[in-house]
Amino acid sequence: MIVQTWKMSWAAVCANKLRTFLTMLGIIIGVSALIVLVSIADGATTSVSDQISAMGSNYLTVQISDDKENPLRLEELSQLFEDDAIEAAAPFGNTSVTAKSGYTSESMRITGTTGSYFDIMDLELSYGRTIKQTDVENNSCVLIISSDTAIEFFGRADAVGESLSLNGRPFLVVGVLSEDNSSLTSGQSLMQSSSDDSETTTVTLEGYIPYSAFIRISDSALDITRFYASSSDEESMDEAENAMEQIMLGRFGQDEDAFSIQNQSEIMEAMISVNDTMSLMLGGIAAISLLVGGIGIMNIMLVSVTERTREIGIRKAIGASRGSIMMQFLMEALLVSMMGCLIGIAASFGILKIAGKVMGDSMNFQMDMQVMWISVGFSLLIGLIFGLYPANKAARKKPIDALRFSG
């Protein structure tokens, strides 16, 4: 019985291929929009989240906006944070300088800090060492550079022992960051033209020097207006933030407006919240397309019922039950809906593949299997809901009236 009903439904669907395809088009567009939009939103948010995660999620960013005429100095920073909840603190200052080595001269972004900064930001070195405490105490002109900077100035990544002039001051390169560590604070992107081809590549030129040496390069760096602090682990971030707030309130006369504290873990939580909101919003927009497709199915099924009134009358006259008539038209609606869903899933897969190739390594788009199954379930529901009324209308026709129908 079911097999026979399915065969009759399939024959009816295939009888007018163009009309069937146009009816499915609403479902195809709706399913494709739902899967593609949600997958792209997930891919974009995952990319941003990965970048934030690469910077670490167990540190605090403290910005001083009003020092109350009692500025925070380098020698005070290490003594100020002796709370057990705060593992390390590092000052931060940056500026642009003119870097020169041999005949190569470029603008370069320099960050003044201490050795703790590399631990807080989880920066790894491929060669050499980080900034030592003795470098800070002795105002040593030592420099840690990025891998791109080393290749740009010296033609190789292992540039330890080389000398680089910053605003006319010679600095000894003592360390080179690994290639995986991009600029986590603020980098200077320079567009370098390749001599081998016409393509343009972006090179980030950056370096890190002791904060004491940074003061001598930048006149505005004597007072610390920004620094980073870390907790022992991610679970104690709230405790570290509370401890930091109390210390800073004591330092600046209980004035909450004198400083601001940004918790990196809160940024991660905000990103997750944004991702969920974006997915729901985009999914809701795409669901509207599916509803429009469902209305199209109902419309064409009502037309089909009218066109096949005499067929319904003949079937009823030879003994077809109301249930079998209803089942046939309902199955036709489900066939149209599910075929549209399958084509929509295939189209989504192709669109995401193309988008992935266009974006390259900067962003990864993958079909969200959960969203795909939601699309299948939603399409099934659309077929049932919007096919039920036409099927019921067909089943309720009286044989004598249906046979008298002249069209």
Image (cartoon, helix red, strand yellow):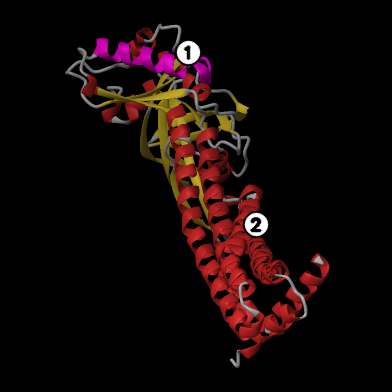
Q: Residue 376 carries which label?
A: 2
- Element at badge 1? loop
Q: Which of 318 and 134 is in front in this view?
A: 318
Residue type for callout 1: Glu
Q: In this view, does 110 lie to the left or right of 160?
A: left
Q: Where is residue 148 in the image (x, y as percent from the top left)?
A: 55, 43
Q: Do the residues labelled 1 and 2 touch (CB within 8 Å)?
A: no
Q: Which residue lies most toward the left here?
A: 69
Q: What stretch is highlighted in magenta?
A: 232-251
Q: Is residue 138 visible?
A: no
- Of residues 252 and 266, the one nearer the viewer is 266
Residue 365 vs 85, above or below: the answer is below
Query: Which quadrant of the figure contains the C terminus?
Result: bottom right
Residue 403 x/y as whole percent? 66, 87
Q: In which quarter of the image is the N terminus?
A: bottom right
Tell me if residue 246 can be seen: yes
The percent coordinates of residue 88 (x first, y second) are 46, 15
Residue 341 figure quarter: bottom right
Mark toward the viewer: 1 or 2: 2
Q: Within 10 Å of the Cα at label 2, are there few (<14), some (14-19), or many (20+) other Cα atoms?
A: many
Image height of 277 relative to 20, above or below: above
- Tag 1 residue: 87
Looking at the image, residue 332 lies above or below residue 366: below
Disc 2 marks which amino acid?
Val
